[in-house]
Amino acid sequence: MKLLIITPALTGGGAERVAINLANYSVSKNVETHLISIKRINHYDGFLNEKVKSRFLTNERLRFQILRLNNEIDKIKPTHILTTIRDASILLGISRILKRERWIFREASPMNGIEKMYFVKKIIYKLLIRLIYRRCDVLIANSGDTLSSLLKITKTIKKTVVIGNPIETHFTGTNMQNHDAYFDKDIILSVGRLNKVKGFDILLKAFKIVNQINKNTALIIIGQGDELDNLRILSKELGVDQSVYFLGFISNLAPFYRNAKVFVSSSRWEGFGNVIVESMSFGLPVVVTDCPGGPKDIIEFGTYGKLVPVDDYLKMSIAIIDSLSNACPKDLLIQRAGEYSIEKISKLYFKEMQM
């Protein structure tokens, strides 16, 4: 058997980290494993097992990507191909007219993003999904919401199954990366791309209330994105800019998980929520929004954390304040996070892939 994993790029996102975790697990089971990143972007240098045969295609236009991908597949001759995100699945379907491998598509998020596209682009995108997804052998969705939203577009998929993401729950990094100065405060932590979907504007408004009640709190937001300047302006307008820190992309989050008091996911919709599981693996209390996607599944609708309505900064602030003094027991959070360990989830993937 020979496995090929395809991902758009190795940027700092959850889907990319899933690709790395599954690739590393695969080679640990002595499966010849290849990983193709469509774009030449790599924020995860050093995380991929050296036994994984990785390559980057091109930053050129789509038509060149299509030709290059098909040529690479012909060279590798895999028995199984796993795509980690919707765009990779569509690119594979366009590139590979003659299918000779077992295809496993991973669906990483609900259709909210597609529904917000311009009309013509949305129609084309949905048509491609209907045409291409019927060719996959198994579709693995990372949450019930993700699967149900996909099935509203197409019902011709051969087999579907819901499996959460494989998450690293045993961090070994100890490097403080010169950020230990922040930890004399009660840290509220959030991690994600700085875009409107992640709802950081709502988190800032919630933090203003929290900080008025507890002056010893600080908010750390880790991630990159187009909304950085707007979020900085908003924090200044809210009068909390002296207690809010935007730290950019950081690969080693362990010091922050260990030292924070509460983790908050403020998304308007979400794929799965890898960082929620990572934070819980440190026993860190979590507050998440009841958004489409995986977060509410991870905390079992409030059993393992606080669940608040989307875009409700008042209820979010109350949940954060409550979590600072009345959190779920650490051992239960760690146990729950263990249900998404790389070993457990990868075994489920390989069972469905028939490997």
Image (tube, helix red, strand yellow):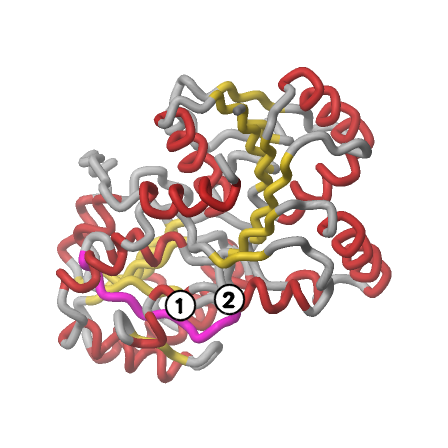
Q: Nearer the viewer, residue 318 or 18?
A: 18
Eyeballing the image, is 218 above or below 239? above
Indicate the position of residue 74 as horizontal and vertical percent values: 71, 19
Callout 1: helix, strand or loop? helix
Number of numbered discs: 2
Describe residue 18's horizontal placement relative to residue 138 as left or right: left
Give coordinates of residue 53: x percent, y percent.
Answer: 50, 19
Real-space CA distance between mark 2 and mark 1, rounded to the nearest whole angstrom: 8 Å
Identify the mark at residue 297; answer none if there is no mark. 1
Tag 2: Cα neighbours inside 10 Å, few (<14), some, or many (≥20)? some
Report the residue at 32% width, 41% height from top. Answer: 343
User: Does the magenta run of residues contain 338?
Assistant: no
**Tag 2: amino acid:** Gly
In magenta, the rendered stretch is 283-292
Judging depth in this view, the residue of 57 and 131 nearest the camera is 131
Mark 1 neighbour density, 10 Å: few (under 14) some (14–19) many (20 or more): some
Residue 144 is marked as 2
The x, y position of residue 153, in whole percent, is 73, 65
Residue 61 visible, this angle: no
Seen from the viewer's position, the closer of residues 265 and 104 is 104
Report the residue at 25% width, 58% height from top: 280
Name the mark on residue 43.
none
Please indicate whether residue 42 sits to the left or right of residue 170 in the image.
Answer: right
